[in-house]
Image (cartoon, helix red, strand yellow):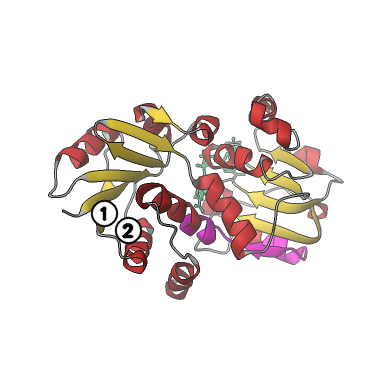
Amino acid sequence: MTDRYAVFGNPIGHSQSPRIHSLFAAQTGQDMSYQAILAEKEGFVAAVSAFIAAGKGPARGANVTVPFKAEAFRLATRRTPRAEAAGAVNTLSFDNGAISGDNTDGAGLVRDLKHNLGCDPAGRRILLLGAGGAARGVILPLLLENPAELVIANRTEETAARLALEFARLPGCAVGAKPDGTGFGGLAGRQFDLVINATSAGLSGAVLPLPTSVFAPRCVAYEMVYGRATPFMQQAGAAGARVADGLGMLVEQAAEAFFIWRGVRPHTAQVLAALNERA
Ligand code: NDP
């Protein structure tokens, strides 16, 4: 019997996850299927239940994307510490009625930075732009890499300040720099070695009010959005930064989920190359 997996979201038509996981399965010889499921905005739990109940093989797990990550967090009967810190779940595992929840976004980002881009966060001054779900998911994994500094800057300054305070109080944060929260106005005159854009501004083509000085010499600028050249990428490139988009993070967070489910870590380089070829 083939083990079954799915990704739930709304919208979901654009999702690359079925392709990524089928490439992982072929590469590692795993007998599994993976489908994209469009859940109604109010129907996430019902859709997951229907997926578990129906089908020929056993349902083993699921990925969860916008807008259901908080609901998946509540659905999980047990959660990993990194999912607790993120307050969101993007990976569910089903086992005899128990539902385990994890969040692989931060691990995916860190792996992309370290292994694909040769950019180790350790000792770097990091600027994280945005304070929504994506930013929240990567803060603890970044802090655990021992950066020299982590500043969270957001359009709504209070959200950044609240988020920084919340993570500064986490016991795990004692090993890294305590994060600091600010608005974009608080960035004047400051410099960073790694600038990560976790805002959704790029989706609407909005330009972030960033002083050019935030990009230190040899800075890496990471845009979580992928598949388009965003104003942030153009801004960073013009300031001399090395620019990357979020496709590597997407593939690496999927690889982490695959590892949780199957106990095998797929090679991501060839999958990333295949996706880049199609882009
Ligand atoms: P949320 O809606 O939770 O948060 C959006 C954030 O963007 C907020 O901080 C918001 O600020 C800010 N923002 C939105 N528009 C603007 C603007 N015009 N100017 C300045 N700030 C703005 O979204 P998520 O955190 O879930 O996702 C953020 C992005 O990350 C998305 O584009 C998503 O595609 C991407 N992503 C990529 C992943 C990958 O694997 N590559 C994984 C997860 C997410 P405010 O608080 O002021 O509203």
Q: Quadrant of residue 118?
A: bottom right
| Mark 1–mark 2 CB contact (< 8 Å) | yes
- Which quarter shows the C terminus? bottom left
Q: Is residue 204 visible?
A: no
Of 241 and 165, nearer the camera is 165
* Magenta-span inclusion, residue 247: yes
Q: Is residue 170 left or right of residue 268?
A: right
Q: Is mark 2 on a helix, strand or loop?
A: helix
Q: Judge from the rendering whether residue 61 lies leftward or rightward of residue 232; answer left or right.
A: left
Residue 222 in picture, x, y percent from top left: 64, 56
Q: Is residue 3 magenta?
A: no
In the rendered image of this protein, does residue 70 appear above or below residue 93?
above
User: Does the beta carbon at disc 1 come under 8 Å from ligand 1?
Assistant: no
Amino acid type for the residue under numbered disc 2: Pro
Query: Quick one: 76 or 42, which is closer to the camera?
Result: 76
Q: Can residue 265 be seen in the rendering of this structure? A: yes
Across and down, in percent, residue 210 comes to 74, 49
Q: What residue type is labelled 1?
A: Gln
Mark 2 is surrounded, within 10 Å at the Cα level, by few (under 14), some (14 to 19) or many (20 or more) other residues, namely some
Query: Dot 1 lies on which element?
Result: strand
Ligand 1, what quadrant?
top right
Q: Residues within 10 Å of mark 1 (few under 14, many from 20)?
A: some
Residue found 43% across the figure and 54% down from its top: 254
From the top left corner, tell me how far across and down residue 78 is, in percent.
40, 28
Which contiguous range is marked in magenta? 234-251
Q: Name the residue under label 1.
A: 35
Residue depicted at 68% across the width and 24% down the height: 169
Residue at the image position 59 percent from the left and 64 percent from the top: 116
Which residue lies under the disc numbered 2? 18
Q: In this view, does 222 lie above or below 28?
A: above
